[in-house]
Amino acid sequence: MSEEKQSSKKDVSASERPVPVPNADSRPYWDAANHKSLAYQRCDACGQVQFPPRGHCVHCHRGPLRWETSAGRGEIHAFTVIHRAPTPAFRAAVPYAMALVDFSEGFRLLLNVQGVALADLRIGLPVQVTFEELSNGQWLPQAGPVS
Amino acid sequence: MTIRDRTAIVGIGSTPYYKRGQSAPQTMIELVGKAVLAAVEDAGLKISDVDGFAYFGGGFDTPALMETLGIPEVRYSAGLTGTGGGSAGTVGLAASAIVGGMAKVVVCVGGLQQVAQRYGTFTLGYEPTAENSFFLSAGLVGPGHMFALLARRHMHLYGTTREHFAEVAISTRLNAQTHPDATMKKPMTLQDYMAAPMLADPHCLYDFCMESDGAVAAVVTSAERARDLRQPPAYVLASAHGGAREWGRALYWMNMPDEVFASSGHAAVARRLYEMAGVTAADIDVAQLYDHFTSQVIMQLEDYGFCKPGEGGPFVASGAIRFDGGSIPVNTDGGQLSGGYIWGMTHVREAVEQIRGTAANQVRNVELALVSGGPSSLPVSGLILRK
């Protein structure tokens, strides 16, 4: 039924939406987002990529870890369309799409998919990162159609 | 050294399964206390015999329970970490305390009262933290949303359909209709299921468990002592909890590799459970599988070896989980989808009833009953009871 509607609206009540809380591990990720850049960690010792960001390499425990910039291209690994808003903050956005997106560098994020018709959502759909501004000025990585 | 077959559940007690908010003005501790007293009475013990508590998901205030119930001394008070995953495993925790000689009569208890915070939006009860920042801002606020992602992947990988989810909902509702304590008794057809509002695609209203208030308690003691008490013992053949790193934080992470992503996270625990018990899925006569979501019942059937991975949909479509004629009746009391949702503990109660032969929907010739704890962030858990 909802497939006939337009893609998810963006006009969520920004003042009520939870804003991210950076810590020492994640601050570079959130800072990069403020520069419209998608950052992820790679281990210098074993070369593997990890998300969420940590203070050490979760694969080899050696490191050091290096922050890299993603090309921002990925594909949908799984998705759901939320039809009932859990809080007033998300009511205006319903129905909205959430997806786990596998980025080409090898990490996975949970994002809203915006600008894609709900009927077009599918596992394997190529998407690219977009950025959305929250109430406190923090930019939040999201996903949108490949341009 | 093993806990296998060394202890038994000798008493069970519960409050009514209230609809969310309807338990007021009773407090949570009152509900818990009532369940504990009922379980002790059922066992033919005195409350002063209780000397231990085994919890999960945060548990309760042991000295407050001692004070209000009249328990003179406690020698064991511990709980499984995590959230709903540990329900079945509390019985194993109690068994380990008793076999280890730390306590003699241990009460396992779970209770819910969703007055302040609905479990469906539990993450909103959290302060935003660095960890939850990666999903809160995107609006993923509840298990229904999170498990919908897994359900969608399962459909993609294996061709599972909404009709398969509906079969779980319908089979469970049928069981609720003939159980005196079950809450939802209105008949459900496939048309009813398909007409239900979609909440988090592919999960509609009937794919979600109920929201209930209540408490359920089970009293565990040694197998030797169990033989002298009031009820036929439900022996703890095996119990295990924990799980593999690949499932890990599950809902809070979801980086699981495909082998476990579209699963219930129970495979590692199921393996150890069957190994401890010395049985396989073919030996289980009735299964109480944690049904927060229909899709997760299908995945637990796979993880517990009742069918191959990916075949859970066709398996339920064959009628295998039906009380009437099924090869492995599931959630015979109406489960959490239609009976009552007390964070997994109603499944422990129903398994004991099935072993005793006193269940409202009694499966014939039950020797072994399986209970699973909630698929969630680790630890998850399992339990096998025997007659």
Image (spheres, coloured by chain):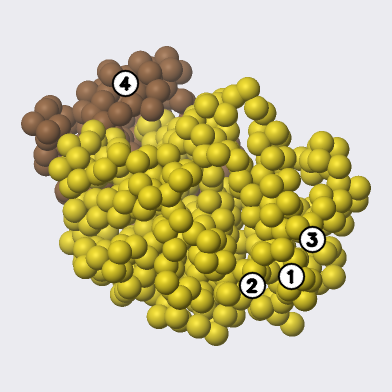
Chain colours: A brown, B yellow
Cβ atoms at labels 1 and 4 below 8 Å apart: no
Marks 1 and 3, how far apart in space? 10 Å
Q: Position of residue B9 (x, y in %)?
A: 66, 64
Chain for disc number 1: B
- In this figure, which residue is indicated by the disc labeled 3? B105
Cβ atoms at labels 3 and 4 below 8 Å apart: no
Of B224 and B104, which appears nearest the observer?
B224
Count neighbours of disc 4 (C-alpha within 10 A) and say few if under 14, some if 14 to 19, many if 20 or more.
some
Give the residue type at disc 2. Answer: Tyr
- In this figure, which residue is indicated by the disc labeled 2? B235
Cβ atoms at labels 1 and 2 below 8 Å apart: yes
Between marks 1 and 3 in the image, the one whose residue lies nearer the viewer: 1
Marks 4 and 2, how far apart in space? 50 Å
Marks 3 and 4, how far apart in space? 50 Å
- In this figure, which residue is indicated by the disc labeled 1? B226
Marks 1 and 2, how far apart in space? 9 Å
